[in-house]
Image: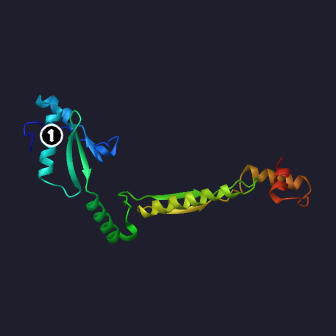
Amino acid sequence: KIFPKVSVPSITFETPPSLQFGELSSSICFELAKKTKKKPIELAEKIAEAANISPFPLIQSVKAAGEGYINFYANFAKFSSLTFESIRTLDTEYGYVKTDEPRRIIVEHTSVNPIHPIHVGHARNPVLGDALARILRAQGHTVFRHYYVDDVGRQTAVIAYGYEKLGKPKPVGKPDHFIGIIYT
């Protein structure tokens, strides 16, 4: 409406380097200046003035800045109110965006190497795996959780073979150390 004879390129918004410049910023006036033969700051002032006349509830104010940037300052009271209302309305669905293309997904996690001792660091994988599975399910995917018991494969075969070859010795010391000795 402000520049009826000018085709406006796609408007992009950036996060300014400092909050003193608002929550969003646009450099569209530099593109418009090339087409209108006007200074970017003049265009920014004109746009800011028009934006402030017809208020948008989530924007507290719009200001021209620098050589021709437009800075947008959020109305945090309105944002807070809208956020709390959304939380009340959506309840446990708040914050989740449902996918348009649900998939069947297997989340395999927690696998522990059978020839090494289990320690507190291994607690990380089940927590991350379960959290990821819950996030994917909340997005609308069909999720299967697989706890891959790492008791198959070459390592286990070597241990079983070694145990047999050594005449099925009685365990000595810690079980994981005993298995490690057989493996080596």
At label 1, the amino acid type is: Glu
Q: How many marks?
A: 1
Which residue does the image show at 11% across and 28% down from the upper left?
Answer: 37
Decide: few, some or many residues near mark 1? Use Cα within 10 Å; few <14, some 14-19, many ≥20.
Answer: some
Does 116 sit above or below residue 46?
Answer: below
| Side (left or right) of 51 relative to 75 | left
Q: Which of 27 and 94 is in front in this view?
A: 27
Query: Picture coordinates of residue 57 (x, y %)?
Result: 20, 58
Q: Nearer the viewer, residue 127 or 13?
A: 13
Where on the picture, by quarter, is residue 146? Answer: bottom right
Disc 1: which residue: 45
Q: Which of 72 and 120 is in front in this view?
A: 72
Query: Picture coordinates of residue 130 (x, y %)?
Result: 55, 62
Where on the picture, by quarter, is residue 145? Answer: bottom right
Which residue does the image show at 12% across and 41% down from the upper left?
Answer: 46
Does 180 sit above or below residue 78?
Answer: above
Q: Which of 99 and 74 is in front in this view?
A: 74
Does 78 sit above or below residue 12?
Answer: below
Which residue does the image show at 11% across and 31% down from the upper left?
Answer: 36
Query: Picture coordinates of residue 9 (x, y %)?
Result: 19, 37
Which residue does the image show at 15% across and 50% down from the upper left?
Answer: 52
Quadrant in the picture for the N terminus: top left
